[in-house]
Image (cartoon, rainbow, N blue to C red):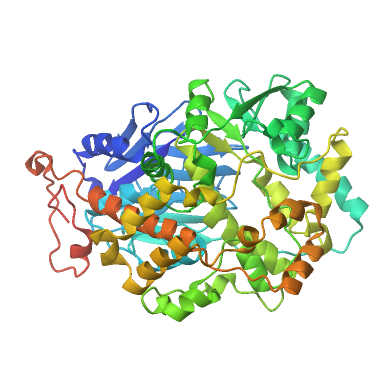
Amino acid sequence: MAKLILLCQRHGVERKSFPDETAILAKRLMPDNFTPSSPKILSEGGVHIAILNPNHLIPIQNTSVALGYMFEPEQDWGNPGESIPDGSMALFRTSPAAVELATDLMGSRAIWYAKTPSFFVASTSQRAIVHFLGSFEPDERARAWMLSSGTIGPGISWDRRINALPLNSRLYLDRSSWQTKLTMGETCFRPENRPHAVFLEQLQPIIKSVLENITMDPQQWILPLSGGYDSRMLLLQLHLNYRDIRCVTWGKADADKNRWTDAWVAKRLCKVLNVNHTYFVTEVSTDGFSTVFERFLAAGEGRIDQLEPYLDGFELWRQLTSSGAKGIIRGDECFGSRTLYSELDFRKFCLATMLADYEDFRRMDIAAQYPQTWPQHLTRRPVESMEMWRDRLYTDYLFPVWLSPLNELKQAYVEIMTPFISRRIIHFVRRLPDRLRTEKKLFRAAVSALSPAVPFARYPAIDLGRTYLKRRDVSQFMGDTLNSAHCRHIFPPILLEATIRNMRSNGSKPITQKYPITRKIRPFLPPRMVKTIQKTLNLQERVDYHDVALRCCIIDAMARKLEEDAKAFSTIDQRLYALTEASSPTDPHISHYRLSSLTAT
């Protein structure tokens, strides 16, 4: 529901302009279809914290903030240097001596930061940091990853000076020496060879214990219920303590009539359990695609290209907020993953494809302009089986690079709690043998053992296809953007020309668009059969130029926004906010960190 900005001035210098800058950022960084709460500002001894669109669910201790949910908070959780509480959150801790940032075990909520000779800034918003840096310096790596995968890539930001705090990490800033120390945890799987029944007997009480310890107001926290295993397990456990828990599902108008969809299954399950359930019909927004696109970028800052769930213009999330919902409980988890056939196959599943994976990009030599390398820490280790590497990639890539951006889109409206990333659950799962993590075999058995006789869904209730990109208004919007002077300044002509040409001719379509029947029958087929069919028909994934067009539009729009963010405060009289700190003109890095509203460096 909130974004957070932390600014620490060196030597305890106050930044008198901070409240006014916060007010400007609050207007720029929030979607335009609801009225956010007024920013909450905490200031002490040169540390300034702003919480945009705050609510009472956010834990605050002096000038320390946990943005998200702590499962078992300790009394001194706000003190830098103390143990990191278990939770799904981004943690910001301050004291007169130090500033500390910490991410949860899965990196479910991103923290970005930059350090200059005169100030340290951290935020859940890259755009806010660019504002305080006073300029925008694009990172071509983010553009490469957006083109190839629809994400900005692992540990990469839009601005090359901004760092991403890794998952399961803590960054400690000593305010006296102005030195930082980064401590990172390591994702390791240590499978134990025990029978299925033994592990099942152990897993069930762990999940039960984690969920029993959750304290919440069921009138303010809502459970989005799909037709799958994850949210069903949450409901089966939570409704034992919260009989008045509210569940919601959303999708197309007729989806609840098809017994294989999320909508029908969720409705049926809630009826059997006597739980309150509401189905929201989502319609394509009448506000116009350009408005929806701008709202999408305001909510998520362009970290991912998956716009299709939000084509209603975020009306669903506005309605939930208006109904009193302050937070949602999500079933994001890491109990295992799908059957693995090759490293490339799983990288495609994780949205981790690279420019070199596609013949189209290789032929145009796009990598010559956009450097892209596979991170060494994500490479398979000698001691890892393919399944261990698969599940580590799911943890270390998919969560921070894909799930975190998806959740950020919702966090403009509601807070998010993800109980299944509790340390107790994750550490247990990493002891499971490969066979019990593949296709989430053990977890599915645990859910089925508790579940009433209600089937699981085969299809989502919403349309997750990309056919909307072929709508006339969307094609016109993307075409105008690709032909703009700003866009042509960013991309090589060969890429823009190929994209525009193939959009018109509908060239290079992926398998599910060339053969739509595969989307219909795939949920009913074993994974190995799907792979066999693909190989037999020689159906290779190809670049879809409508996807490329959308990704170019995101890159272009974010560059525009970040350029504007750097200048957003320049209209205010700088003399009103002059600092007394001496500048350091001899430092070669000073020019990279010029402040737009302040002259001290």
**Does residue 199 appear in this view?**
yes
- Residue 274, located in which quarter of the rendered image? top right
Q: Taking 445 as reference, is 56 left or right?
A: left
Q: Observer-nearest residue: 387 or 190?
A: 387
Q: Observer-nearest residue: 168 or 112?
A: 112
Q: Residue 481's spot in the image, x, y percent?
A: 32, 55
Q: Observer-nearest residue: 459 or 565?
A: 459
Residue at the extreme left of the image, as rendered? 575
Q: Taking 597 as reference, is 172 left or right?
A: right
Residue at the extreme front of the image, as rendered? 505
Relative to residue 331, is residue 193 depicted above or below? Answer: below
Relative to residue 370, is residue 284 depicted above or below? Answer: above
Q: Residue 269's spot in the image, x, y percent?
A: 78, 29
Q: Taking 94 as reference, is 17 left or right?
A: left
Q: Residue 163's spot in the image, x, y percent?
A: 39, 60
Q: Residue 189's spot in the image, x, y percent?
A: 72, 64
**Does residue 428 appear in this view?**
no
- Residue drawn at x 19%, y 63% is 590
- Residue 160, located in which quarter of the rendered image? bottom left
Relative to residue 495, is residue 182 depicted above or below? Answer: above
